[in-house]
Image: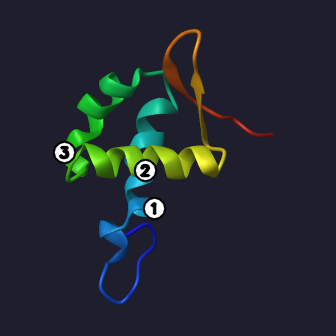
Amino acid sequence: MILPNKLISFQDCILAKTVYILEKISDSDFSVIGLYEQVETHFEDLNEYMLALDVLYVLGKIKYNEELQVIQYVEKN
């Protein structure tokens, strides 16, 4: 489900859905729940959303600021 294959199209895989998250957090920081409320129409359920966050974290595209309790976009030079 993370990557497309013969049964799962690219539009339905988690990797494609991470784009919706990146578009939202590129401009400002969000709490986990606040971000979910912004992008929930693109995900089947909360589990799929959390999997997308995990993928982005592992890829180094987002980080969680524990002090502010927000998800932040990681900019790389």
Whether residue 19 is visible to the viewer of this picture, yes or no, is: no
Q: Residue at x 58, y 43 (%)?
A: 57
Q: Which residue is mark 3?
A: 41
Front: mark 3 or 2: 2
Q: Nearer the viewer, residue 68 or 30?
A: 68
Label 2, label 1: how far apart the Cα atoms are: 7 Å
Q: Colour scheme of this structure image?
A: rainbow
Which amino acid type is shown beneath numbered disc 2?
Answer: Ala
Relative side of 66 to 47, left or right: right
Q: Which residue is mark 1?
A: 15
Which amino acid type is shown beneath numbered disc 3?
Answer: Thr
Quadrant of the frame with the C terminus: top right
Tell me which label, 2 or 1, sits earlier in the chain: 1
Tell me which label, 3 or 2, sits earlier in the chain: 3
Q: Residue at x 35, y 29 (%)?
A: 35
Secondary structure beneath dot 1 equals helix
**In the displayed image of the protein, which residue is found farthest to the top?**
67
Q: In the picture, residue 61 is in which quadrant? A: top right
- Disc sitting over residue 52 in the figure: 2
**In the displayed image of the protein, which residue is found farthest to the right?**
77
Whether residue 49 is visible to the viewer of this picture, yes or no, is: yes
Relative side of 60 to 20, left or right: right
Q: Nearer the viewer, residue 28 or 57?
A: 57
Label 1, label 3: how far apart the Cα atoms are: 16 Å
